[in-house]
Image (cartoon, grey):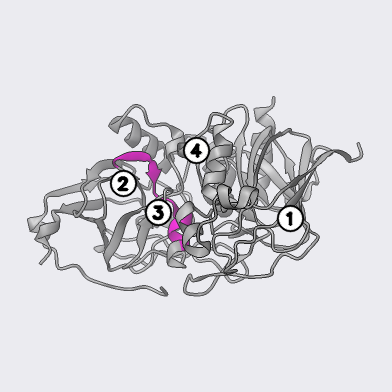
Amino acid sequence: MSGAILVESKLDPAKALYREIVLAGDPWIREIKAGQIFRIVDLEGNQAADTLFYNAADHADRYSYQDTIREQGNIYLTTGSKLMSSGGNVLLTIVADTCGRHDTLGGACAAESNMVRYAIEKRSMHACRQSFLAGLLGFDSSFEKRDIPGNINFFMNVPVTPEGKLTFEDGISEPGKYVEMRAETDVLGLISNCPQLNNPCNGYNPTPIEVIIWEGEHVS
Amino acid sequence: MPEEILFEELVHPGAAWSHVLKRGTALRLTDLEGGANAGMLLYNFECPVERLNLPDTLKAQHIARLTKDFVLYSDMGRILCSVTADSLGWHDALGGASNASLVKSKYGEATYQQCRNDYHTNGLDKFLIELAKWGLGSRDITANVNFFSKVSVDGDGGIKFEPGFSTAGSYVELRAEMNVLVILNTCQHPLDPNPIYAPKPVQLTVKRVPAPFDNDPCRLSRTENERGFTLTERYFL
């Protein structure tokens, strides 16, 4: 696999099973059934959607970026990417993508990582791993911090140079760009609509995203 | 205070090892034969829910590899280990660990009954068994480092494993900045194109070492790391 594979969806949001706007800085969590189609829309552009998936039948079997990268031989996600679990299972497959590149390596911002990256005084700023914890604990109080592995950053552009340098480039997303994936098994989806204000991953202005789910048989 | 070797141990090919590496000690890994791979996970021994976080490690230092003068961050903004010596210049943070189905499809099956201690094993299962000895399990599996292996990335994001990268005698040294539970295995890298199941041994040397000075190269390599050391030192106050 190489480069962006831009594919538009034929699905009609008017026929969706579920639609929800996730406001800037909020978490979102919901089960997505096998065969259902799940879309995340970058409504205003340049917004990072930090996302995790868990096997609904076994939450210990969850998205693994290292397994995903290795199985597809590429660090970027785009159409055709299979999102792999730590147990070696395919959780979802990306079936449409109008953005073309999504990050696997940058992980999520946290109060603690902001202290390292920017200033110790940044501890109190809202961060994705606060939202991940709030989302998980709101869904099931048996979740813990150890249930937060490295996540996907949909709509984020984090290139690696041949010399092994990680760079943070301006986003390549624009208003209305979306990524759409098919659940290959029942999964629990978790999003932190990133509140980061210390770097340009959200253009210094976090904005809403939309989440849309269709039943699989509505594919036309 | 001069360095003092506390003990040495050979980790056999395709085997696992774990140890609480105390603050003030260091672990040197040596590839005795060339072509070794040492998969590693790190935890704060006192509170293992604090553990190695490779995304935080990479983005704080703007790197997609590990080498001397860089550090390994926990998810709590603290430094678990610093890389204080390295003869190779690149250790993999991308490839992860092999699993049973990968090893079976690449190398076929070889059971204990057939092969005794040369039976085929894999990185994930080795991690899980070693973690279980410390009360940890599959929810504690996270992204791992592969010492002695190089996986580079091209302009389109494609990844490439470099065969023959680590030569006999190559070494890397980790200084513990906290009391760190080290979980290690010597299974082959999951991207190793060698069609033969041929994991290699790794020699371990545990030393007592001086605490990092104010001018420590890992501390000064980035302003992020100065703050990381400050936060780590505050944990012990």
Q: Residues within 10 Å of mark 4 (few under 14, many from 20)?
A: many
| Camera sees residue B65 | yes
Amino acid type at mark 4: Asp
Place of residue B233 in the rendered image (x, y in percent of width and height, measured from the top left) = 70, 32
| Camera sees residue A154 | no
**On the same chain: label 2 and label 1?**
no
**On the same chain: label 2 and label 3?**
yes
Q: Which residues are magenta?
A: A56-70
Amino acid type at mark 2: Ala
Q: Are marks 2 and 3 in contact (CB under 8 Å)?
A: no
Q: CA distance from mark 2 to mark 3?
A: 17 Å
Q: Return the residue at label 3.
A: A152
Question: Looking at the picture, does residue A148 appear above or below residue B55?
Answer: above
Question: Looking at the picture, does residue B225 appear above or below residue B192?
Answer: above
Q: Is residue A60 magenta?
A: yes
Q: Are marks 2 and 1 in contact (CB under 8 Å)?
A: no
Place of residue B114 in the rendered image (x, y in percent of width and height, measured from the top left) = 57, 52
Chain letter behind tag 1: B
Image-quadrant location for residue A60? top left
Q: Return the residue at label 1.
A: B68
> For this rendering, which residue is in front, A147 or B12?
B12
Place of residue B115 in the rendered image (x, y in percent of width and height, measured from the top left) = 61, 52
Q: Earlier in the sequence, mark 4 or mark 1?
A: 1
